[in-house]
Image (cartoon, grey):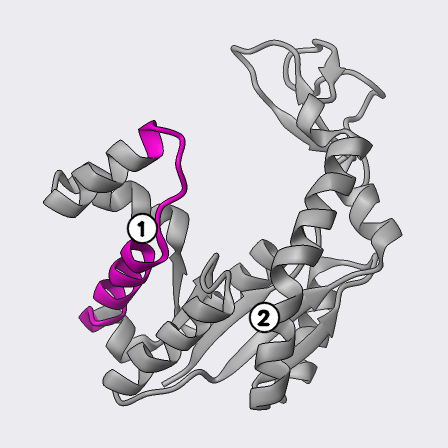
Amino acid sequence: MLNYIFLGPPGAGKGTMGEMLCERTGVIHLSTGQLLRDEMASGSELGQKVKSIITSGALVPDDIVTAMVSKRLLQNDIRQHGSLLDGYPRTTIQADSLKRIFADNATELTAAVLVDADRDILLGRLTARRICSNKACGAIFNLQSNKPAREGLCDRCGSALVQRSDDSEETALDRLRVYDQQTAPLIDYYRKTGKLVVMKSREVTAEQNFATLLAALNM
């Protein structure tokens, strides 16, 4: 059974590469963000606890996130098809917990995939998003990969396109700094286990980048 985790900075294309790998291999995409939302929506005791923590503005503790991941990995679809973990683990403590979860399920991690890219590419991607100023429309464009037909104007409704404050270069640099601080230990952790696979994302088509990923995974 195939089990992957994806690491990488914001803007590297983890989401796109993950979707394509799931489609090719049949593994189940498992997002911790979606797990939290599903648990809250279920109305379970754990879900109510998670909701109160998030409402208070605090971070959901490691043990709760790990419990939800463990519960999800035991379900039949993942036991049959495998998994691709997105957003977990975020720390070496979580990585140790994941190793135990896999062992308890009589399986193991296939690869920790680091989807990386040069910093100038990351900054370009993170600052290229533009959103229609007409909230009723809400169309999203990207000046690199999904340009509007007319510069600065929405293709759908003709309204002006704007850049959100969290898409600014300052915010992008801050997101990359946080990534460097939080993820570097995980990269070292999986390199030492021999499970790390590095794929360099370039300014080419998604299909070309996916071919690079498959080559890195020897698929």
Which quarter of the figure is the N terminus placed in?
Answer: bottom left
Task: Please tell me how crowded label 1 is: few (under 14), some (14-19), or many (20+) other residues with Cα within 10 Å.
Answer: some
Q: Quadrant of residue 167?
A: top right
Q: What is the total number of numbered labels drawn onto the structure image? A: 2
Residue 96 locus on image (x, y percent): 41, 76
Residue 143 locus on image (x, y percent): 80, 34
Q: Is residue 41 above or below residue 113?
A: above
Name which residue type carries label 1: Leu
Q: Quadrant of residue 97?
A: bottom left
Q: Is residue 13 visible?
A: no
Q: Quadrant of residue 154?
A: top right
Q: Nearer the viewer, residue 99 or 126?
A: 99
Local secondary structure at mark 1:
helix
Task: Please tell me how crowded label 2 is: few (under 14), some (14-19), or many (20+) other residues with Cα within 10 Å.
Answer: many
Q: Which residue is mark 1?
A: 35
Sequence-earlier tag: 2 or 1: 1
Residue 38 locus on image (x, y percent): 25, 44
Residue at the (48%, 75%) spot, across then down: 4
Q: Is residue 91 above or below residue 76?
A: above
Name which residue type carries label 2: Leu
For this view, does 72 lie left or right of residue 189?
A: left
Residue at the (68%, 82%) spot, across then down: 216
Q: Is residue 142 visible?
A: yes
- Of the numbered discs in the image, which one, if any, rests on residue 170? none
Q: Nearer the viewer, residue 152 or 157?
A: 152
Q: Which residues are magenta?
A: 54-76
Q: Which residue is mark 2?
A: 186
Q: Nearer the viewer, residue 152 or 79?
A: 79
